[in-house]
Image: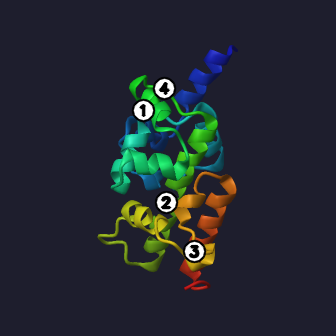
Amino acid sequence: MSAGSRLGARRSQRSPLWRDLESGRAPLATLYAFEPMEHIALVREGIPAAMLPVVASEMAITRDRLYRTIGVARATMDRKIRSRLRLSPDESERLLGIARLVGQVDEMVRESGEPEGFDAARWLAEWLETPLAALGGEAPASLMDTAEGRRLVSDLLSQIQSGAYA
């Protein structure tokens, strides 16, 4: 089987969540529900660059702010959007990191039993810009360009949920 055939076969086996994501119909928090192998495939194939404005819109932030947060160049991202290209695996991993945090926050609020009217994407966008003592006065957004930084921010959210950090 050729590489193109395998790719086509893989795409036809994607979950409805994946297809909704690619079409821009899925909310950002949806990515949190993907299985690990789906995350890996998404990163390897590259998230469609067209998701960047969708993510920025859902978080109620500018594209420039999103680009700064994930540490990518504006000119490159805008060119990829115009040309309908996919993000590189590294760029995809960074955007996926934001999406996973939105899903994590959404899940935290659902577990608390009070999700009505809460907008996880917008809350996260604001929280990411807030300097935190737990990060030595840094804002979580300043750490989103590295895998270790995204893990640290995710861990901090978990600590906040458990009450281990106030």
Q: Which residue is mark 3?
A: 137
Please state which amino acid type lies under the numbered disc 3. Gly
- Which disc, if any, is residue 78? 1
Q: CA distance from mark 3 to mark 2?
A: 25 Å
Q: Which residue is mark 2?
A: 103
**Which of the two discs, 3 and 4, labels the residue nearer the N terminus?**
4
CB under 8 Å between discs 1 and 2: no
**Which of the two discs, 1 and 4, labels the residue nearer the N terminus?**
1
Image quadrant occupied by the N terminus: top right
Q: Nearer the viewer, mark 3 or mark 2?
A: 3
Horizontal and vertical percent position of residue 149: 64, 60
Secondary structure category for the residue under label 2 = helix
CB under 8 Å between discs 4 and 2: no
Q: Which residue is mark 4?
A: 85
**Which of the two discs, 4 and 2, labels the residue nearer the N terminus?**
4
Please state which amino acid type lies under the numbered disc 2. Gly
Q: CA distance from mark 3 to mark 1?
A: 32 Å
**Which of the two discs, 1 and 2, labels the residue nearer the N terminus?**
1
* 18 vs 89, nearest the viewer: 89
Q: Nearer the viewer, mark 3 or mark 4?
A: 3
* 57 vs 3, nearest the viewer: 57
Q: Residues within 10 Å of mark 4 (few under 14, many from 20)?
A: some
Q: Is residue 26 visible?
A: no
CB under 8 Å between discs 1 and 4: no
Horizontal and vertical percent position of residue 105: 48, 67
Q: Residues within 10 Å of mark 3 (few under 14, many from 20)?
A: few
Please state which amino acid type lies under the numbered disc 1. Asp
Q: Residues within 10 Å of mark 2 (few under 14, many from 20)?
A: many
Which residue corresponds to the image point at 57% horizontal and 53% vertical from the top-left? 97
**Which of the two discs, 3 and 1, labels the residue nearer the N terminus?**
1
Secondary structure category for the residue under label 3 = loop
Q: CA distance from mark 3 to mark 4?
A: 37 Å
